[in-house]
Amino acid sequence: MIALLVDKESPRVRYILNEIFDRRLGLKSTVFTEKETFKASPEKIKVKYLTINDENLPGLFIQCHEMMFEHSLNEYFSPKTGAMKLPEDLIDFLSESESDKLELIGPFLILFPGDGNLGFDPLAMTFYYLSRYEEYLPFDGDEHGRYHYQNTFEHELKYDPEPFVDVALTRLYWELGIKDFKRFEIAATADIDILFRFHGRSFLRSLGSFFKHPLFMVSRVLSWITGKDTFAPSSGLIPFFNSLDGVVKRVFLLASEKNNHLNKQINLRGKKAQKELKLLENTGLSPRFHASWTLHPQESWEQELNHPVWNGSKPVESRQHFIHLAFPQTYRTLISLGIKHDWSMGFAEHVGFRAGTSRAFYWFDLAANKETELMVHPFCLMDVTAKNYMHLDVDQAIAMGDSLKKSIKLFGGTFCFIVHNESLSESQGWKGWTQVFKSWATQ
């Protein structure tokens, strides 16, 4: 049990305590506002989360930031930043080799520096990251209006991508004498934006593609003759997932029937498409919901969730097409449609930890100032990010995956990555990349 003394109650403080103690460590926390009651409480671990320290009271002092007790957004707010080095004894505890020790020397990014035993406010830092406070504020998005890596403190201050929330909490746990037993897992996830490369289209759409992309004429004709398609799950995606052991597996299917420059899924009602989807189901890879890019999410996603492809059983897990998240609208819409888990928390154009963590967490609706039941599953690496945005070659992409996995192993969490059925096709520019993804999925 953990006792926390505060100047006053706050939904934000309660949420963060649930996240960092109850959910991560399985330790119950109790909030006190009366000093004498706090002092007399039986909990062995005590934290004074106050504006001014009271040295007559036991426990670790963390100087709280006023943001944690506010009830609304401040669109002009931006936290101060600082740097932290980990204590030598903590480095020795975390490290298993000399190379690990080099990784842990730091310095690491922190937010909300101030007085107190730690020199910063880890609760406020965690809340700022997990709530996505910065994404409610004005920012310069990319061509799709997305919040991207260039908007982050990490990019501005030239830090390498690290799960800075996990680092900060590791420091907090160590100071409190709590051992966070590092749990590491890999989550291999795939998006199916277009089920087939050449099949499944209407005659007019196929004819248009035939003349629009003359370089693929031979491949297209051969595919029509043989009936084989390199994007088909049975060609690359299913064999890839079947080759993996001991990893979390998820597949997300775009079920939109819109046909525009952002949503290009083929007809999923056809026999050939149904056969492939049945194979996915029989392999234990029943697809989850891949929400289309749209300006009218409530109407569009409700229609997509009612698509016959789900056989009347609506998915409760989702990922956004193009990783398009807008706060709070996206998550509020998903919640209203019955989604319980979302896997969209990451960057499209760069590797990294968009919410500062590699661990799943419940979304806090900042505009409503309350915790929700939507579980957010972060990812830190995507196939098109490595190849198309960062222009990495095969060896560099393998090295990038190894570096991210090493960091997550040190602080505990999930190395979650995204591939596509296209990138597993060994065609259309993806020759040799399957070995990259197998490397990413290896402990």
Image: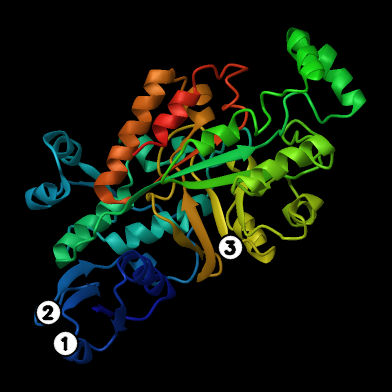
What residue sits right under mark 3 in the picture? Answer: 340
Disc 2 residue crowd, few under 14, some 14–19, many 20+, Cα 10 Å: some
Identify which residue is drawn at 17% across, 49% down. 94
For badge 1, the amino acid type reads Lys
Q: Residues within 10 Å of mark 3 (few under 14, many from 20)?
A: some
Relative to 349, residue 50 above or below: below
Report how far apart the C-alphas of labels 3 and 1 lie in the structure.
39 Å
Q: Circle 1 sits on which residue?
A: 39
Which structural element holds mark 3? loop
Q: Depth check: 262 or 429 in front?
A: 429
- The span from disc 3 to disc 2 (Cα, nearest Å) is 40 Å
Q: Amino acid at mark 2?
A: Pro
- The quarter of the image holding the N terminus is bottom left
Judged left or right of residue 253, residue 364 is left
Q: According to the image, label 2 marks what residue?
A: 58
**Residue 151's spot in the image, x, y percent?**
46, 39
